[in-house]
Structures are given as structure tokens and as C-alpha cells.
Image: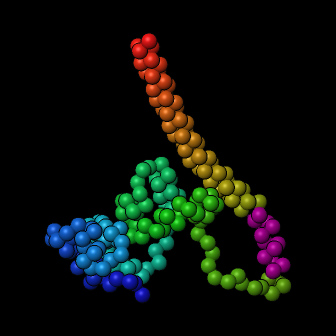
């Protein structure tokens, strides 16, 4: 069960919109432990209306491409998980957190949909037919899968490359700043002599 009801969340948001107080005041007044929770409710309400405060009972599924797009946006922009979720109309920012963490640990394959349920057991005759059919189709399937793996690896390398370029740029800026500081320091020492 959800910790806070829809009506409770809406009353907190309405109090904020009426100007009764800020995040901290309202969190204290209504006994909410985190001001981030209040901030999140207000942002969700402003973006999605009442639906932003309701707990979604639907298991919405997102495609692999969409998840990958969201991860790329997070890694290449300076948006927070919350801001990214709201801008992409995802009602649950923790999904973005999970996708990014999965991508960082296991790469793009972690974002692919997983098969659900128990594997089906087959009798021996069916297994033999399946094996002979799959051997015939194996050349086509592996080439498609191989291309998909290569595309995923290419994407991962592009993201890594962009990260390393940015890191190099920041280091060069820092070195230039240190060099200027040293030059100004030596120039001021020469002026003292």
C-alpha cells in the first residue's frame, strides 16, 4: 500500500500553490520526512496534473530504443533524474535511475526486454524437430543478432568517447588555469624584486 494517499498529496500540493509555505514548511506541517518528496509531488502535479499524484497501477512497458535514448540523454546532459523523467513524461524517476545503473554495469543489453515466465519443457520428438529447424535458421538469426551486438557496442563506444573527450577538455582547461596562475605568481614575484 502506498504511504500517502492521493487526497493527502493533493492537499499538500494545493497548500503550496495557495502560497501557504515552501517545501520545508509544508513537509514539517504535514509530517513528511523529506522535503524532496514534497518537491517531487509539486513538479509531478504541475507536469501531469492529478495523474502525477496517483500511483500508476499499469505496468507500462518501454522499448529498448526508448530506454537507450533516455540513458543517452542523462549521460550527455546535465539534467537530474527527476527533471529528465518529467521532460520525457515518465511518471517514475526511479525507472531512469535503474536504467542508467543497469547500462553502467552491464551495457546496452541490460536494457533489452527479458522473457517472462517459466521455460516450457518439450517432449523428445518436439525437441528434435526444433533442433533441426533452428539449425536451418541459425545462420539468419545469428547474423541479425551479431549486427545488433555490433550496433550496441558502437553506441557504448560513442558514449564512452564523448565522456573521455569531455574529461580531456576539462583537464586542459584546468591545466591552462594553473599555468596562468603560475605565470601571474612569477610575474608578481619579479615585480617585488
- Residue closer to the observer: 24 or 64: 24
Q: Position of residue 38 (x, y in %)?
A: 31, 71
Q: Is residue 36 above or below residue 11?
A: above
Callout count: 0
Magenta range: 127-138
Vertical order, 191 against 84 (above or below)? above
Does 121 sit left or right of 106 as displayed? right
Q: Which image quadrant is residue 142 in?
A: bottom right
Location of residue 24 by image quarter:
bottom left
Q: Horizontal and vertical percent for residue 4? A: 34, 83
In the figure, residue 88 lies in which quadrant?
bottom left
Residue found at x 77% / y 70%: 134
Is residue 184 something that shows in the picture?
yes
Specify the quadrant that holds the C terminus: top left
User: Which residue is depicted at the point 49% across and 29% down?
Assistant: 178
Residue at image position (41%, 15%) is 192
Q: Can residue 135 be found in the magenta stretch? A: yes
Viewer-closest of 144 and 73: 73
Q: Quadrant of the N terminus?
A: bottom left
In this view, the residue in front, 82 or 12, is 12
Residue 6 lies within the magenta run: no
Can you say whether 157 is above or below 90 in the image?
Answer: above
Q: Is residue 3 left or right of residue 48?
A: right
Q: Measuring from the top left, give residue 184's x and y in whole percent.
A: 43, 21
Residue 124, image x, y percentages: 84, 85
Main secondary structure of the magenta stretch: helix
Whether residue 69 can be seen here: no
Foreground residue among 39 and 111? 39
What residue is at 56 percent from the left and 62 percent from the top?
Answer: 101
* Position above or below: 74 against 137: above
Amino acid at each position: 500500500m502506498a504511504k500517502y494517499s492521493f487526497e493527502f498529496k493533493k492537499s499538500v500540493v494545493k497548500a503550496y500553490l495557495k502560497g501557504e509555505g515552501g517545501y520545508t514548511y509544508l513537509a514539517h506541517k504535514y509530517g513528511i520526512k523529506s522535503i524532496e518528496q514534497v518537491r517531487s509531488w509539486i513538479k509531478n502535479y504541475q507536469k501531469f496534473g492529478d495523474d502525477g499524484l496517483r500511483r500508476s497501477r499499469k505496468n507500462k512497458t518501454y522499448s529498448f530504443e526508448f530506454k537507450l535514448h533516455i540513458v543517452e540523454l542523462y549521460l550527455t546532459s546535465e539534467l537530474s533524474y527527476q527533471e529528465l523523467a518529467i521532460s520525457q513524461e515518465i511518471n517514475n524517476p526511479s525507472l531512469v535511475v535503474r536504467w542508467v545503473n543497469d547500462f553502467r554495469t552491464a551495457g546496452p543489453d541490460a536494457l533489452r526486454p527479458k522473457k517472462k515466465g517459466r521455460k516450457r519443457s518439450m517432449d523428445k520428438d518436439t525437441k528434435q524437430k526444433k533442433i533441426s529447424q533452428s539449425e536451418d535458421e541459425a545462420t539468419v538469426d545469428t547474423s541479425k543478432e551479431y549486427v545488433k551486438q555490433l550496433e550496441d557496442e558502437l553506441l557504448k563506444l560513442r558514449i564512452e568517447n564523448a565522456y573521455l573527450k569531455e574529461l580531456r577538455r576539462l583537464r586542459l582547461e584546468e591545466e591552462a588555469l594553473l599555468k596562468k596562475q603560475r605565470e601571474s605568481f612569477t610575474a608578481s614575484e619579479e615585480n617585488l624584486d
